[in-house]
Each structure stands twice: as structure tokens, then as C-alpha cells.
Image (cartoon, grey):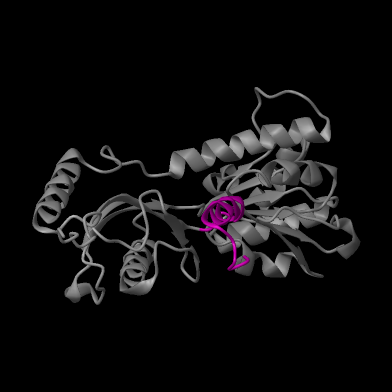
């Protein structure tokens, strides 16, 4: 990511790549301040983009934002900062700041195989906030350009890399080789670390794989964890893009089932009320910033 980006460019980039970030907005000021309301900046775990005025205020706000990111608290917070000696700034005014934590995406997808369906799927996943790893043993199978959230992974032995790649990820097996599909299924069942496993193929292929895996000693519950045919049954069609739409719809449904959702969200009314009272109290005790011109003596 280019550190010179403006805040809105950084938001778009983080959303595209699925990177968590905090959008910081000045929502209110009183007295003399370094920046005006609606000034914004973006804070990620490694970088900041744009500015709300610099100095110790920006340093402290950045630290608060990174505390949120480190604790995975993707919530909305209001903070009030008097710009006095305690903050190391001499403006003398006060600033109210809104911190909006955005989780980006912790949804990860690993796709084995770079055939027609996988290519169609990448055109869809590239527009969604998922982090995608695309695996194939054929280096020339990948297109020259990939979406920002898609990482190509060329390997001579995809099966050996399953444990490294697939932990806490949704996995799709879309390869050109049935034996490789079967070996990947076994490796994924042995690792038992993926969020879900989908296998492209017909019901006949599913029945054959189920029988082979059962003979290898895998339990019925383990085998049931592999979705084959993959995709939603209510989305018809056999063209690559139709299959890709069906698969992506299923993935979104699986991810939605995992996402926690608290009953209370955003900033509570008591927090807003308290912040308004703080701002009113500061404004009442500070000289008006606009009235700084000394009076003209009468002649």
C-alpha cells in the first residue's frame, strides 16, 4: 500500500485487500485546533494515511486505534481530547474524535486449481473482502493480473502444503486431476484445520470418493465435512461463471453463519450525551478562538 494515499484511497485499498483498519474522523472542535471537523485519517496495524493535524493528538489517536486493532475490537468509539499542556500541545482548544473500527475480512479462502471455474470465481472473489490464496502446480495457469486480495501460490506439491496453507480457511478443490483431488481431501481430513472443504464434481464423483475415504478408515462425520457437489443447489447452470456464482453464494452463506453479531452496535446514546456535555464544559471555560484580535484604542 502506498503511504502517500489519501484517507479515501486507503479505505478503498483496505476494503479491497480485506485488511482491518480504523477510520478516524474529527467530529467536533472548540477553540483553536490544528484541523477542522470532517478531517479524516486511516490507521492500520502498520501504517497511517492522511492526517488529523499531527502532533501528540495524532500520536495518541493512532495508539488508541491500534489498541482496537490489536484486541480485534471492531467497534465505534468517541473520544474527547483537550489540547492543553497535558497533551503536549498549546492550541488550547479541544477535539472530539470518532474512531470506527473496520474488521476488513478475516474470511480466508484457499483454492486448489487454476482452471476455468477457478478463473471465473476469482473475478467474483476479487470484488469481495476475502483474503484468497490460489494454488496450482502449473505456473502458466495463472493470469498475468490478479485482484489485490488474491495471492498466487505456485507449488510442485500442493498436498504437502495443505497444513501450512489451510488452517482456519475455507478450502475449495477445483483441480483438473481426480487423483490430486482425492489426495487433497485426505490431507485436509488429516489436518482437520480448515473451516470448510468444498470439492467440485458430480454426485457420482462424490459417491466414489465417499466409498474410497470410508475404506481408508475415515468416519462418516469426517466425510460429511466435504461438500460435493460444491455450490448451492438452487443456483443452476454448468457454465464456469454459473458454477462460480453458485460456489461464491455458498461461501458467503458459510461466512455469514460464522460472523458474530452483538445485540448493541455503534456508539450508545449515554456515550454521545456524555461527550456532548464534555464539549459544552470545555467550550464554556475557553476563550473564543475567533475573538483574538486586540481591541482598537479610541483616539
Q: Nearer the viewer, residue 288 or 14?
A: 288
Residue visible at 49% across and 71% down in the picture? 46
Query: Where does the magenta region start and end?
Result: 1-19
- Measured from the top left, where is residue 239 in percent x and y? 83, 30
For the view shown, which residue lies furthest in the front direction? 299
Residue visible at 75% across and 43% down in the picture? 123
Q: Nearer the viewer, residue 180 or 142?
A: 142
Q: Is residue 173 in view from this perspective?
A: yes
Residue visible at 60% across and 46% down in the picture? 223
Relative to 271, is 295 above or below? below
Does 25 sit left or right of 232 as displayed?
left
Relative to 26, is 226 above or below? above
Q: Nearer the viewer, residue 254 or 87?
A: 87
Relative to 49, is 218 above or below? above
- Measured from the top left, where is residue 45 in percent x and y? 46, 68
Relative to 1, is 131 above or below? above
Q: In the figure, residue 265 lies in which quadrant?
A: top left
Does 169 sit left or right of 87 as displayed?
right
- Measured from the top left, where is residue 98 in percent x and y? 32, 51
Amino acid at each position: 500500500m502506498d503511504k502517500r494515499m489519501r484517507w479515501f484511497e486507503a479505505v478503498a485499498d483496505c476494503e479491497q485487500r480485506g485488511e482491518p483498519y480504523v477510520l478516524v474522523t474529527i467530529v467536533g472542535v472548540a477553540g483553536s485546533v490544528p484541523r477542522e471537523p470532517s478531517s479524516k485519517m486511516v490507521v492500520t496495524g502498520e501504517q497511517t494515511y492522511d492526517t488529523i493535524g499531527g502532533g501528540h493528538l495524532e500520536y495518541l489517536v493512532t495508539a488508541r486505534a491500534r489498541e482496537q486493532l490489536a484486541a480485534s475490537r471492531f467497534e465505534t468509539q468517541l473520544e474527547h481530547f483537550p489540547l492543553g499542556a497535558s497533551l503536549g500541545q498549546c492550541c488550547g482548544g479541544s477535539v472530539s474524535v470518532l474512531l470506527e473500527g473496520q474488521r476488513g475480512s478475516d474470511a480466508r479462502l484457499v483454492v486448489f486449481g487454476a482452471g476455468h471455474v477457478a478463473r471465473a470465481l476469482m473475478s467474483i472473489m476479487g470484488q469481495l473482502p476475502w483474503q484468497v490464496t490460489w494454488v496450482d502446480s502449473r505456473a502458466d495457469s495463472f493470469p498475468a493480473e490478479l485482484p489485490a486480495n488474491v495471492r498466487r501460490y505456485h507449488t510442485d506439491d500442493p498436498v504437502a502444503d495443505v497444513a501450512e496453507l489451510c488452517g482456519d480457511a475455507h478450502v475449495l478443490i477445483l483441480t483438473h486431476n481426480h487423483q490430486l483431488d482425492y489426495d487433497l481431501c485426505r490431507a485436509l481430513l488429516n489436518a482437520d484445520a480448515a473451516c470448510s472443504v468444498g470439492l467440485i464434481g458430480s454426485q457420482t464423483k462424490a459417491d466414489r470418493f465417499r466409498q474410497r475415504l470410508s475404506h481408508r478408515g475415515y468416519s462418516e462425520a469426517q466425510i460429511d465435512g466435504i461438500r460435493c457437489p460444491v455450490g448451492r443447489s438452487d443456483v443452476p447452470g454448468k457454465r464456469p461463471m454459473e458454477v462460480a456464482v453458485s460456489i461464491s453464494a455458498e461461501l458467503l452463506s458459510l461466512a455469514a453463519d460464522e460472523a458474530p453479531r452483538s445485540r448493541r452496535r455503534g456508539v450508545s446514546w449515554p456515550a454521545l450525551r456524555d461527550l456532548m456535555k464534555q464539549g459544552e464544559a470545555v467550550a464554556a471555560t475557553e476563550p473564543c478562538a475567533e475573538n483574538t484580535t486586540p481591541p482598537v484604542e479610541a483616539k
